[in-house]
Amino acid sequence: MRGRAWTLGFLGAAGAYLAASLTFPLGSVAKPGPGFFPVGVGVFLCLVAAAVTTAAMRGVPVGGEGGAPPAEARGRVAATVGGLVGFCLLLPWIGYAVCAFLFVALLLRYLGGVGWLGVLVTAGLSALVTHYVFGVILGVPLPRGPF
Amino acid sequence: MGPLEGLVYGFGVALTPGNLFACFVGVLVGTIVGMLPGIGPVGAMALLLPSTFVLSPTTALIMLAGIYYGSMYGGSTTSILVNVPGEAASVVTAIDGYQMARQGRAGAALAVSAVGSFIAGSLGVLGIVLFAGWLAEAALQFGPPEYFALSVAGLAVLSRLTGGSVLVSLVMVGFGLAIGTVGMEPISGYRRFTFGSVQLSQGLELVPIIMGLYGVAEVLVLAEQGLRRSRIVPVALREMFPTREEWRRSSWPIARGSVLGFVTGLVPGPATVLATFLAYTVERRVSKTPERFGTGAIEGVAGPEAANNGATAGAMVPLLSLGIPFSPATAILLGALVIHGIQPGPMFITNQPAVFWGVVASMYIGNFLLLILNLPLVGVFVSILRMPQAMLSTFVLLLCLVGAFSLSNSMLDLWVLVATGLLGYVFRKLSIDPAPLIVAVVLGPVMEKTLRQTLFMAHGDWRLLVFRPISLTLFVIGALVLLGPPLAAALRRRTRVSAAVGS
């Protein structure tokens, strides 16, 4: 059961969605309001999520039977997610070019396989090329930061 | 405009320098992303979508469609040479393709795969010409109830055909529909699930969701596995010619795979993946020597490779003639058209002949370009695989980040990308396919609009929704596909129990 606890997450999310949908004006069948469709979706979601949870509790295979990855692998995933979150947090403050350079350099160094020179060249080129393509050619107003 | 006249007109559109270049870029990018385990065709299409804003709708669609079918060619290269399928539709090719490579027949496998893909792609173009017009005419009979029924039936079939538990696929459909309700409601302007955010009033963008679920999630999976460098089987140009016997063995599998692939493409679901498994099963069944499959049978390469290309062409038919996407890739193509103010549907061929015929003709040209790219230049593409995977993965992530931001210059899209990336990784660990979620995000607003239109029209009489002939047929098909197998299994169980009690 422990490995299938995620199905309860589905049920919880479905319940929360239905509860929020019920706060919108429902209207009637002849004149459906903004809440009509979301409530229908919420009821459907709760039913199928409950069915998945019941099936999982009865031992029916519903996915997720594999084990957790080893600690080292989890570390690499966490570092990558950390890099993505860091990029989002820092982008408005330090600007795209510096943020992209730091993101590529730190991630490349952590994920391994590339020396410091390769890291610096790749990070510099990646930041430069993407800034030129998106910021200059496509005219995207990328955050500039204090620089 | 008749089919032949339309095709000639389409070649006129597709052969202009700008469109020809867009086609080349599309198939080139498609070949590369098909080869590289990582971003995949859907992620690459989503990534390049912002760069098509400055292009005309025809050019944009030609480029994005090129990535879609081009990736099917590229995927076979890594399956055969490295035993690492670049994308899911090439998994089956690796079974016999890599065995052929180990026996020194990698060149022959690549050549048969490329020629088979070209034939299937070309036949698929003819299929689009024949079927899209016919289906578009039939779709003129469709009103809101039929579109609602088609969306429901499509999602039901998709849930059944997507791998894994049907119930979990239905949960994915539910979450996709739920995501589609975020933002300003189109009829009264009521804000739903916006939590006071102005950015959320516009709803959640599809592209960061797709980039996250496919691109970012794939990189996270690769990071978990350790980002190894691939070991490549070398292949020389002189080995690229299959023997006469190999051609003879491949011809019928290519023909069967082309037709099977195209038909599978018409059905909602992971058509390209499903088509390859079906083609492989069919070839093994019809073979007089099925024991050769798995040990380097060229039929096991020819059939599936033709099938996945046929399926990409088939999947274009419902999109172009009904305006309904049945897969994440066609959902992006729909998004590209909508961004340019074009809504595909029954009148699409009549109202936008340049886009329709231009794209159809470009697919033929693109298949020809792919044949050139994937035979003599295979060595060049394979050398990309020698790049450290950490470098490629990091660059892909950076492209996803800047691509998501460029959609509407919004930090919200970046956070959606990261959140859906993490969610996609969790789904991968739980063996859950996110395709039903993506398609439901697109179809959700269509379903809500058509449902409410129908109920308004019928003054609340729900029978209008169900008992019109086309919608009833579609609902019955959806119900049969969804409920048929478990009901049949229950019936078989009951019969066995009765027989056991009787005896």
Image (cartoon, rainbow, N blue to C red):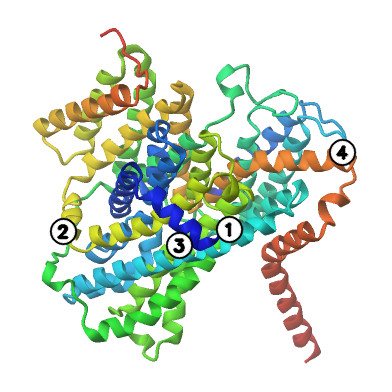
CA gap, disc 3 and disc 1: 19 Å
Q: Position of residue B309 (x, y in %)?
A: 41, 63
Q: Which residue is mark 3?
A: B125
Does A108 appear above or below B26?
A: above
Residue located at (50% from left, 52% from top):
B433
CA gap, disc 4 and disc 1: 30 Å
CA gap, disc 2 and disc 4: 63 Å
Mark 4 Cα within 10 Å, few/some/many (few <14, many 20+)? some
Q: Nearer the viewer, mark 4 or mark 3?
A: 3
What amino acid is at disc 3? Val
What amino acid is at disc 4? Val
Mark 1 Cα within 10 Å, few/some/many (few <14, many 20+)? many
Does B469 appear above or below B228?
A: below
Q: Nearer the viewer, mark 2 or mark 4?
A: 2
Q: Which residue is mark 4?
A: A29
What amino acid is at disc 2? Gly
CA gap, disc 4 and disc 3: 44 Å
Q: Which badge, 2 or 1, comes first in the chain's sequence? A: 1
From the viewer's perspective, tell me whether residue B370 is left or right of residue B309. Answer: left
Closer to the camera, B499 or B186?
B186
Q: Which residue is mark 2?
A: B379
Q: Position of residue B54 (x, y in %)?
A: 40, 30
Residue located at (61% from left, 45% from top):
B440
From the viewer's perspective, tell me whether residue B379 is left or right of residue B88. Answer: left
What amino acid is at disc 1? Pro
